[in-house]
Structure formats: structure tokens, C-alpha cells
Amino acid sequence: DSKDFDSEVDSVCPFCGVGCQISLKVKDGNVKYVDGINGPANEGRLCVKGRFGFDYIHHDHRLTKPLIRRDDAPAKGLNVDPGNWQEFFREATWDEALDMAAGGMKGRGREVAGFGSAKCTNEEAYLFQKIIRQGFGHNNVDHCTRLCHASSVAALMENVGSGAVTATFNEIENADVAIVIGANPTENHPVAATYFKQFAKRGGKLIVMDPRGQALKRHSSHMLQFRPGADVSMLNAIMHVIVEEGLYDQQYIDAYTENWEAEKAHLAGFTPEKMSEICGISPEMLRDVARTFAGAKAAMIFWGMGVSQHIHGTDNSRCLISLALMTGQVGRLGSGLHPLRGQNNVQGASDAGLVPMFLPDYQSVMDDGVRSAFTEVWGSEDFSNEKGLTVTEILDAVHAGDIKSMYILGENPAMSDPDVEHARDALAKLDHLVVQDIFLTETVNFADVILPASAFAEKSGTVTNTNRQVQMGRPALPPPGDAKEDWWIEVELAKRLGLDWNYSGPADVFAEMKLNMGSLNNISWDRLERESVVTYPSLSPTDPGQPIVFGDGFPRADGRAKFTPANVIAPDEVPDAEYPMILTTGRQLEHWHTGSMTRRASVLDALQPEANCSLHPSTLRKLGVEPGGMLRLTTRRGTINVMARSDRAVAPDMVFLPFAYVEAAANILTNPAVDPFGKIPEFKFAAVRVEKA
Ligand code: SF4
């Protein structure tokens, strides 16, 4: 009841890219309760994280003072935790900490690099990339999109001309067929999954494709549990049938696409019979799926990290784009391409230019006109016209001695990067590391300066969800102790780097972003304060925004989307006698990424308190391990011990390992090999040996 609370503040869930709108109920300076409200993506619904995962903001591990590494601190890399941090760090004033943070970076040009955050707001992401570009003259700035959908974005930019979704996930209401591939929405996009289930309940045909079984299987018309890494063979076979049986939409292809003849010729060799041997799906099923999808009045394709996190991630997405184009399933009611975005603001952070190859709105850093439009607004010198280094390339450059100082805001590469010991060794080699965060993450083990930042409920700022919906986040509380809003910290740091920045708040930053971001046309800070959400593109100051785009051509030079044929490529590291099984990593419903927030959220931690991995019961029997027993997992990178769970959804030659648990860090094992286009690591496939511990 309203009278039970001192205030009720409308904001946006801080976890996944669904972007559910919430109401924060505050009493005596604490958020006591969270309720779902009527946002366009959630219509009042929330999952367990959104409803119960908020009390980490009041956890006594919150950083409340700037910290500086002691002169007599033990070696970098040792574990810093709330019980021992005084051995490593001392408290400092903001002036001292900011001076030291900036002092270790100023004037060092290419020796400095930055990882920004998809957990921060659009304004904070924009300021972060601006610090690196304006302050150091280059583009060595990236964030976790590189570990998430970078390959999807590469394929979408190449073939459609835009990295964002062509239709909101809610458009499934108007579809009669939908493919969900390499995604597990009931765990990872739970509120979106409720729309998918309703679609199936109304008679929509839900085609689920995933090497791992999952809860959506119960709602599916077709379940294709294909062999891990065999996406291209399966998708090319489906498209082969569409060509062979003349089920493609020639009118659409002629009007809106290019390179069709090359694609058609390429697909000739991918017969279902041949591809079945690679992907493990029967030719009959491949033909049935092809006919079902091509026969749809309106069809959508959703995909997740199971598609993107492969060395052939870009090829996987190219196939999905080709499938939608050849059947004319883009730009109409109930049709579209939708990579389900991971972090709450990974879409917005990418839109805001927090990537090494693009300025805001995906404008190329190599384009002289684009750079001069930005430097004119910034009142600064030109900066490098070379694409910057990506997340994994930056860490390699640290190893090579080329990068010596880093600014890391809200990312935790000491847990999240592939082959994490390589990442940790890189962080230890830096001679200056500034970490801005809300907790002592694993990355602060290597920090020289720690800047205490704000949680989502403590600041104003816009975030953009998977649906291209720009939403207003509002503060319910001040940050704890001396912690500050992230935009304020960035501005103070920039001033000490000699930049002439004079923002009085995020509204000022948003106004500057609009000067060079056409996607924000008709979307103003005032409007977002009033309406809470506007979808881009918005065609007028009263248009709530367009849920579907590209009904009349594509934002490519000639207005046409492109078919890019894809070949079958084996995973980088195939199983062998020494490492005979397949390791795949991912998330669980209750925990978020590296666990720094959700493992400090009391309800979520109670639901999933310990590190675990899942294997088929027959595999556990062969290993002589009961569910709950301990396993030792070993790859060419390292070894971990972790508790076993029995799960029939996992194929007998596979292990599924969540990556939220530091005590059994999945990324000690993962393969750092990357997709050549998106530069995304192959988190979804590594050869592993599994033994009883
Ligand atoms: Fe939050 Fe995503 Fe759950 Fe919605 S579905 S409540 S955005 S975690």
C-alpha cells in the first residue's frame, strides 16, 4: 500500500536487456519492495531477479569511500575482500583519488585504454568513450558487447545496415511462426519468454533450436537439439529446401535485396541429407521446418549467445538474416530479426559509441566527416582514424607492453574474459589501473585506485533495451557514504585530464548526444521524464516510436539488404582423446554475469547459493558421480572443481557451466579464440576433460 512507503519511484530493472519497468518502494532510506509497472516491454510482469534481486544496493560490501593502493601493499592479484581490504588499500578523499587516477593516465596517449559498462546509463557510456577519444586521441575503448552480440551486430551492420533489432519482441503477438535459436529465454530473458509462451498458447508455431534442451521445448511445435557448433549446416540445409522447393519470396528479394543469385548457388550443396550428418537433425525435420517457416504469414527470428559466441558467430547471424530476407520476413507486422540483448543497457552503450570502431550511432571512426562533426561539438582536436582495439585485443596489447594504464568502469574482466588467467596476468602487468565500481570485484585485486560508484537506484539516466526503447531511470536514493554518480566521476576525471567539460547533469549530456545521434530525433530528456519511454526511431515529438523498421528498404547505400553466404566451419577446439567432451557456458535465471550483484541479493543467493555444472544423468553414471558430487573439469587453459547436477536437457557429451561463480570460475576454462569479424570469443565451445574430483 502506498501509505506504507515514504516514496515510490518509477525506474528500469538493472539486469537484462528486456528492460522491465519497475516501481521502487522506499521506506526509511531503503528500497523495501519492487513492483512491475506498465512498461511497453513488460506490462507489469517481472522475473525473480527484477522483483527480488534489488537488496544488493544496500549490502554492507558497497564501496563508500575512494581507495588508493598502499605503498606497502602485497602483490597485485591477491584476493581483496571486505575482510582484508585495509592490507591493500587506504581510504582517500575524492580529490586525492581523482588526482591519482588522472595522474596515472594523463599524457600517455596510446598507453591508455578503457572498458566502459553496459550496466551504466547512455549518458555515462557516451562520456566514457569521449574521455578515451578526446582525452587520449584514439579509439581503444570497448565494453562487454564484445563478449555478447558483437558478431550479431557485425552481420546486421554488413547485411541490413543497422545493428539493432528490426522489430520488438512483443511483435511476436502478430506472428504465426517464430524461431528461437541459441537462446534460453525462460532463464535469460524471462519476461520476453512469457510473450513467447502466450504466442504458442494461441497456436503460434514456436521452433526452438538449441544444443541444450530447455523449458521452451514444452511450448514448441519443433525442437531441434542440434550438435553444438553446427548452426550453419542446419540453417543452410533449411534454406536449401526453401530454394529447392521454390518457397522463397521472389518479389521481396527483387525489391529489397542484393546478391541473391550468389546465395542461391551457394546453398545448392547443402542438402538436408548431407547436413544432417553434421548437425544431427533428421532431413525430414529440416524439410518440415523449412516449409513451416517459409509458409508463415508473418515470422520472427530470435537469437542469443548460443548463436553469437562462436568463432563462426557472424556466419551464424548471416544465415539467420538470409533466411528472413529470402522469405520476406522483415519490416512487416509480426516479422523481424531480433538478437535478444544481454545487459540492461548493452544496446544503449553500443549506440552511444562505447565500441572501438564506431562513434555514437554506429558512425565509423574512419570517416573524416564523422570525426569532424564530433570534434566540432566537443571543441577538440581530431583523433585517430584507425579502428581501436577490442576487449581481448586490449588485454593482448597489455601483455605486449603497448598498453600500460587502464580505466575500467563497471566491468569485471578478471572474471568475464575468456581464458581468465591470461586476462588476470594482463591486469597485473598494468602499471596503473583505475576501477570504478560499486563492490570490490575480482578486478580490484589489480587496481591502483578504486572509485566508489552508484547503483541504478541512485542516479538519473536513460537506458535502451533490446527493443530500441529508450527509458528513463530515476533515483530513489542517494549513493551510500561518499560514493558518487558515475557521470560525476567521469566529468571530474576528465577535468583533471585537462578536458574542458562543463556538464551540470545527465540531461546536459543527453542534449549533447542528440547533436550527432539521429536515432534520438524527437526524443528529448523532458519527453522521457514525462513519458518514461520512447522507442527509436520516433517520427515526431508525439510518436511513441516505431516498433518495426525497414518496411520500405534498408539503411544501406542502395537501400537494399544483402545476402552473405556462409560456409560450415568447425569450432576452434574440437574434442579429442585428451579432452573428449564439450564445455559450454552461460547464465542461470537467478544470477547475473559475474555474480557481483546477484550473489549479494539475499533471495537470489538463497535460491542458487553454490557453483554448479549440469551433465546428462548417463554421463554422471559413467563417471561414478552422484548429483551433488564434485567434478574436476580441465581444459587446455586450466582446471576447476565444481558440484555436479543431473540434467536430461544436456547432451551426453556436454557440460553446461554457469559463469557467475568465482570459486569455480568458468572462464578459467574457456577458449579465447575469436570470430574474425565480430572479435567475439568462443565461450560456447571448448574441449574439456571431466573427472570425479
Ligand atoms: Fe529484469 Fe530482465 Fe527479469 Fe525483466 S526479465 S525483471 S528486465 S531481469
Image: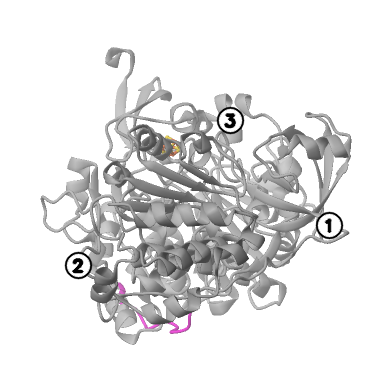
Q: State the SS at label 1.
A: loop
Name the residue beneath numbered marker 3. 60
The residue sitting at 49% across, 73% down in the picture is 267
- As drawn, is 484 to the left or to the right of 669? left
Q: Nearer the viewer, residue 152 or 470?
A: 152
Q: Of callouts 3 and 2, which one flags the residue occurring earlier in the amino acid sequence?
A: 3
469 vs 586, left or right, is left
- Image quadrant of ligand 1 equals top left
Magenta stretch in the rendered image:
378-387
User: Mark 2 is on which residue type?
Assistant: Asp
- Asked whether 78 falls inside the magenta stretch, the response is no
Q: Amino acid at mark 1?
A: Tyr
Q: Nearer the viewer, mark 3 or mark 2?
A: 2
Q: Are marks 3 and 2 in contact (CB under 8 Å)?
A: no
Q: Are marks 3 and 1 in contact (CB under 8 Å)?
A: no
Q: Provide residue 536's location: percent of width, then percent of height.
A: 25, 56
Per the rendering, the mark at residue 579 is 1
| Callout 1: CB less than 8 Å from ligand 1 | no
670 or 338: nearer the eye?
338
SS state under label 3: loop
Left or right of 365 on screen, residue 273? right
Is residue 383 a member of the stretch shown in magenta?
A: yes
- Tell me which label, 2 or 1, sits earlier in the chain: 2
Quadrant of the drawing holding the N terminus: top left
User: CA separation, marks 3 and 2?
Assistant: 54 Å
| Residue labelled with disc 2 | 552
Report, in whole angstroms, how far the alpha carbon at label 2 lies from the one at label 1. Answer: 50 Å
